[in-house]
Image (cartoon, helix red, strand yellow):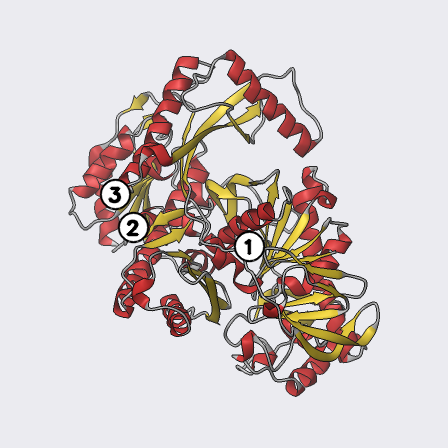
């Protein structure tokens, strides 16, 4: 079973291996207590499928950590750092969210200044002690923070990624205050160069940990009450699974775990369909997440951002735009139409949900264009109201724009499509990639409605709409591998092959140990070494793999191959390579995976009467036109549908515009050309 919490809905996918059947459902997310929405969804899918005792595997993508950071609902955290670094969290790296806005808001302060304490003691850039740690001052700082009732203490000292002795000593002093005092060291969470990124990542990890710990405890208790006693696995942002207890310790890695599962599903599905290059467009109720698969591999990065705060950890390169089904449409003071980023979410939701929503949304626009069936939304679980939606849409959007309701609804769709197109262009064209060599994998509840116009605007190869697109990310949880990432800054200012190989041996050993702790056999572990490199004088790095096996000693020849890969990547991304310039080794990484059983069967349908009638649907090319409607679940492999057409299923609706052909592949996916 895979469970994915989104901003609007919680998605459940259950694969019955004995009957080779897939069961899916969507239930409204419950932000006040996310575990309740999970339990509701699990109960719902079990009612129509298997006995609870038959569930042998459970993986979960959660938005709890993401919401905690976005909404600022973080616990009280204290910080112990070096003299002179008390304000590093506010100074940051001097990046301005809006470069030319003199009145832009600064990122939120995660730790108030009165909870940030300085302690004398200093290491140099080689990790050698310059001034000893002042243990008396450290004890006083700890005592002061505990008197403020902080829930946890973060220790982040300069150059601890080279020498963790001072941080470890502060940790020991915290333990002397009592076993119940929670703390974390930056050298354990993020042992890499750059003090601001290391500090903020460690602080966010500890802050999110409190939320994730409470959530996991509540969820595991509720699952036990259901009789579900299988181990809980949680997706991390790197695209792999962690045991629940490990996810709590690496809490920051659970941020954006749902979209990461969508990227994994994109890779798996595009590979099966023979497409080496794919762009995943996960359009849900609140936002759209874009991921890239190039040459069969998910594009990854080591830095991200949430709520204008940097996150430094190995992760899938996810790019988010505030355009989703619940995105609110509005006309600004200059009479320009805007869509998003504010969303109606699950509560109150779009107007048509009849849940108290009073503001026009993208979902309302698609309903008024005839693209969504008001009587068969979410398989009939939600009856959509049309008349009041039309009335409020006319008042809020159509009349201010001087358009008919249908014209205004199409305008809302066009604005959203333009936002999606810009985002995909930003992660392809602006990085030296041609979107014309990619297929667009469209999923999420809203994705298949917007896929073709976006793909046409970018001249992409085609559109692939997977089976059950509305719960596609949840299905990614069933094909994700167990993944472990370890990293460490390179310890020497110059190249020393002995030190380089010694550090890599340590990292690889740590990866194997992590898997051993999870009871995996080392023979099943696959490990890859990678290096973050840069040209001398640059302030940013590119990550490139080291060829060969982890047992291969890195020498001049192997390093030359790695450096050539760096030159090639730099040329592809930035249009040039300085092959005569010295290259610096900055960070060493080792990533290990254990292949999971792929709980994702091919969908075979005997076929049937898939045609469900006709209705008027508005398209920009034709206006209102009588359009054939099909039931997705009855379309057998090889079936071809000529547009215009609408293909309905419980989790989503696919729009096939005029002059577009949809073909059902052997795996049950829809290929739109």
Residue located at (32% from left, 38% from top): 515
Q: Observer-nearest residue: 484 or 151? A: 484
Task: Identify residue for label 2.
Answer: 245
Q: CA distance from mark 1 to mark 2?
A: 36 Å
Mark 2 or mark 1, which is nearer the start of the sequence?
1
Left or right of residue 433, residue 202 in this image: left
Q: CA distance from mark 3 to mark 2?
A: 30 Å
Residue located at (61% from left, 69% from top): 634
Farthest-out residue, front: 606
Task: Identify residue for label 1.
Answer: 105
Q: Where is residue 655 shown, x and y percent of the image?
A: 70, 67
Up-down: is 487 above or below 472?
A: above
Q: Residues within 10 Å of mark 1 (few under 14, many from 20)?
A: few
Quadrant (top left, top right, bottom left, bottom right) of the C terminus: bottom right
Mark 2 or mark 3, which is nearer the start of the sequence?
3
Q: Residues within 10 Å of mark 3 (few under 14, many from 20)?
A: many
Q: Nearer the viewer, mark 3 or mark 2?
A: 2
Quadrant (top left, top right, bottom left, bottom right) of the N terminus: bottom left
Q: Residues within 10 Å of mark 2 (few under 14, many from 20)?
A: some
Q: Observer-nearest residue: 24 or 577? A: 24
The answer to whether residue 106 of the structure is visible from this angle is: no
Task: Identify residue for label 3.
Answer: 141
Q: Where is residue 395 shown, x and y percent of the image?
A: 71, 82
Mark 3 or mark 1, which is nearer the start of the sequence?
1
- Quadrant of residue 442 within the rendered picture: bottom right
The answer to whether residue 30 of the structure is visible from this angle is: yes
Q: Nearer the viewer, mark 1 or mark 2?
A: 2
Q: Where is residue 656 shown, x and y percent of the image?
A: 73, 65
Up-down: is 549 above or below 229?
A: above
């Amino acid at each position: 079973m895979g469970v994915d919490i989104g901003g609007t809905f919680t998605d459940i996918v259950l694969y019955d291996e004995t009957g080779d059947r897939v069961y899916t459902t969507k239930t409204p997310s419950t932000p006040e207590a996310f575990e309740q929405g999970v339990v509701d969804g699990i109960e719902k899918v079990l009612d129509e499928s298997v006995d609870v005792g038959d569930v042998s595997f459970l993986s979960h993508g959660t938005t709890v950590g993401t919401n905690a950071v976005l909404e600022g609902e973080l616990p009280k955290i204290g910080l112990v750092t070096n003299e002179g670094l008390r304000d590093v969290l506010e100074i940051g790296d001097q990046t301005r969210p809006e470069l030319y806005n003199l009145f832009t808001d600064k990122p939120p302060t995660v730790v108030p200044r009165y909870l940030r304490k300085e302690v004398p003691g200093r290491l140099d850039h080689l990790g050698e002690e310059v001034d000893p740690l002042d243990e008396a001052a450290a004890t006083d700082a700890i005592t002061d923070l505990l008197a403020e009732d902080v829930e946890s203490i973060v220790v982040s000292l300069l150059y601890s990624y080279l020498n963790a002795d001072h941080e470890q000593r502060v940790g020991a002093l915290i333990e002397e205050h009592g076993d119940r005092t929670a703390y974390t060291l930056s050298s354990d969470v993020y042992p890499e160069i750059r003090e601001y990124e290391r500090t903020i990542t460690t602080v966010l990890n500890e802050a999110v940990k409190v939320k994730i710990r409470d959530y996991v405890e509540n969820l595991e208790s509720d699952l036990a009450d259901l009789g579900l006693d299988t181990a809980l696995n949680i997706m991390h942002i790197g695209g792999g699974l962690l045991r629940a207890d490990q996810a709590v310790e690496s809490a920051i890695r659970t941020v954006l775990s749902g979209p990461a599962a969508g990227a994994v599903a994109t890779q798996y599905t595009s590979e099966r369909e023979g497409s080496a290059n794919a762009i995943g467009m996960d359009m849900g109720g609140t936002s759209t997440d874009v991921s890239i698969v190039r040459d069969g591999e998910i594009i990854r990065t080591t830095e991200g951002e949430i709520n204008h705060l940097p996150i430094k950890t190995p992760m899938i390169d996810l790019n988010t735009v505030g355009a989703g089904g619940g995105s609110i449409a509005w006309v600004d003071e200059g009479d320009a139409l805007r869509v998003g980023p504010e969303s109606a979410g699950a509560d109150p939701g779009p107007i048509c949900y009849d849940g108290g929503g009073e503001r026009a949304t993208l979902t309302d626009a698609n309903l008024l264009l005839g693209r969504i069936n008001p009587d068969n939304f979410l398989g009939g679980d939600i009856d959509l109201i049309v008349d009041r939606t039309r009335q409020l849409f006319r008042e809020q959007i159509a009349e201010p724009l001087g358009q008919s309701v249908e014209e205004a609804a199409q305008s809302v769709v066009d604005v959203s499509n333009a936002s999606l197109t810009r985002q995909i262009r930003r992660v392809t064209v602006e990085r030296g990639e041609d979107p014309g060599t990619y297929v667009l994998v469209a999923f999420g509840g809203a994705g298949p409605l917007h896929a073709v116009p976006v793909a046409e605007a970018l001249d992409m190869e085609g559109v692939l709409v997977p089976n059950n697109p509305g719960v596609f990310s949840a299905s990614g949880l069933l094909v994700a591998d167990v993944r472990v990432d370890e990293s460490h800054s390179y310890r020497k200012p110059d190249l020393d092959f002995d030190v380089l190989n010694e550090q890599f041996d340590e990292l690889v050993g740590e990866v194997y140990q992590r898997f051993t702790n999870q009871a995996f056999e080392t023979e099943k572990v696959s490990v890859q070494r990678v290096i973050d490199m840069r040209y001398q004088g640059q302030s940013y790095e590119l990550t490139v793999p080291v060829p060969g096996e982890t047992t291969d000693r890195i020498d001049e020849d192997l390093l030359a191959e790695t450096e050539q890969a760096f030159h090639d990547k730099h040329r592809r991304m930035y249009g040039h390579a300085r092959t005569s310039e010295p290259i610096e080794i900055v960070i060493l990484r080792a990533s290990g995976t254990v292949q999971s059983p792929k709980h994702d069967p091919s969908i075979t349908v005997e076929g049937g009467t898939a045609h469900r009638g006709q209705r008027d649907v508005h398209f920009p090319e034709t206006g209102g036109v009588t359009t054939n409607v099909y039931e997705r679940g009855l379309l057998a492999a090889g079936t071809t549908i000529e547009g215009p057409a609408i293909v309905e299923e419980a989790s989503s609706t696919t729009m096939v515009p005029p002059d577009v052909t949809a073909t059902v592949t052997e795996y049950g996916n829809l290929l739109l050309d």
